[in-house]
Image (cartoon, rainbow, N blue to C red):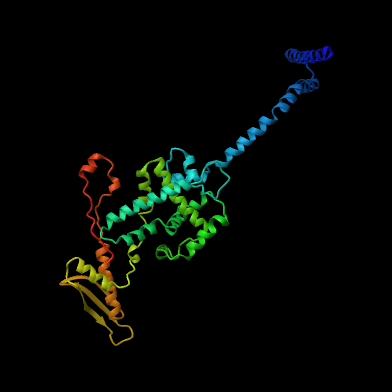
Amino acid sequence: MRDICKTKCTFHHYNILVNFSMFSLVKNSIINRNILPLLLRRSCFVTIRSFSNTNTLYIEEKNKIIHEDKKDVISPALYAFAARMRLDFSDPKILLQAVTHKSFTNTNLPPNKRFKELGERAIELYITEYFHMKFPLLHTNYLEKIVNIYNGIGTLSTFGSEIGLKYVVRWNESTDLFSSSVEDQSESTDENEYLYESRKIFNKIGHVMAQTVQAIVGALYLDKGPNSAQKFVKDYLLSRDLDIQQLYDVKTPKKDLSALMRRLGREPPISRLLFEAGRLTKEPIFVIGVYSDTEKLAEGFGSSLKMAEFRATRNALLNYYFKEIKDFTLPSAIDTRQKQMSYIPTKVCDTPAS
């Protein structure tokens, strides 16, 4: 034991002596260039070897932490997307979570499922409110169809493709997650086919982009408040020019128009021929007008009297149910007591199906 302690002390004094000798030589500027590297190597060997042996675990843990941090790095593309869409979240990781699909596993963030569920309900609320005030006479079943268009896979996936969402969304292609939903969507005949027959996206990335748009709205609702979410829906979804009147698929317009006039206490509709040309040719033209007493409700044309009457009665129904209110105030926009006192609600009329 005494010999070991003596050896350690001798070794320690040796290091001190070498370091002191080096200092003296450098100070007096008489050191040989060939001797200095050898002295440095011998002097530093003891300390460097001891440090590297005792810090292997530390280095491994540090590399592990760096690797974990690289999982959820905000990409330049996502920063550009946020600036382009004017998405100013309090934390950039909120947007990163909103574009993270449940199929993406290489992340420490939760998926956007909760954002998506909230955003889907928020979009439905704002669209329903908007068209309910804009078309107060519209059937409730057709109002539901309009909501399904604006909040459906076809519209949202097309919108997501237009804004470049496919370049920032984080997802992994998985048959287990997408095969059934894609098959169900491709076999469906919902209202989106009327408006996006040539542009509809019934593939996996289309579903992911549609859900991501809903998740972004939900994230805005939670982080920035309902006004920001409503503004997003108004600027990017309600501003889209969609022909919603073609959704009015009525089979018996003459019968429905008669029931409507009877419910309104007006004279039953009467069809009158307004114009015709080429009755005896292969391509005749007929124009029919539909009247209630002396008021002309609508007119329609066709290659036969029956077709012209069908179109005229259908146009009369469209003119009534799609009567637009130009100036109206949304109930959700009443956020102060002063506005509540001066708010005049839009008259909502009785609109039975027929």
Q: Quadrant of the N terminus?
A: top right
Dividing the picture into quadrants, the one containing residue 72 is top right
Dividing the picture into quadrants, the one containing residue 26 is top right
Residue furthest to the left: 294
Q: Nearer the viewer, residue 339 or 28?
A: 339
Rendered location of residue 319, percent (x, y): 25, 65
Residue furthest to the bottom: 280
Q: Quadrant of the C terminus?
A: bottom left
Rendered location of residue 29, percent (x, y): 75, 15
- How many marks on residues? 0
| Residue 241 in sight | no
| Residue 125 in sight | yes
Is residue 283 placed above or below 238 in the rendered structure? below
Rendered location of residue 208, percent (x, y): 50, 53
Q: Residue at x 38, y 57 (%)?
A: 150
Is residue 344 placed above or below 223 in the rendered structure? below
Q: Residue at x 78, y 20 (%)?
A: 39
Rendered location of residue 170, percent (x, y): 53, 48
Left or right side of 34 for 141:
left
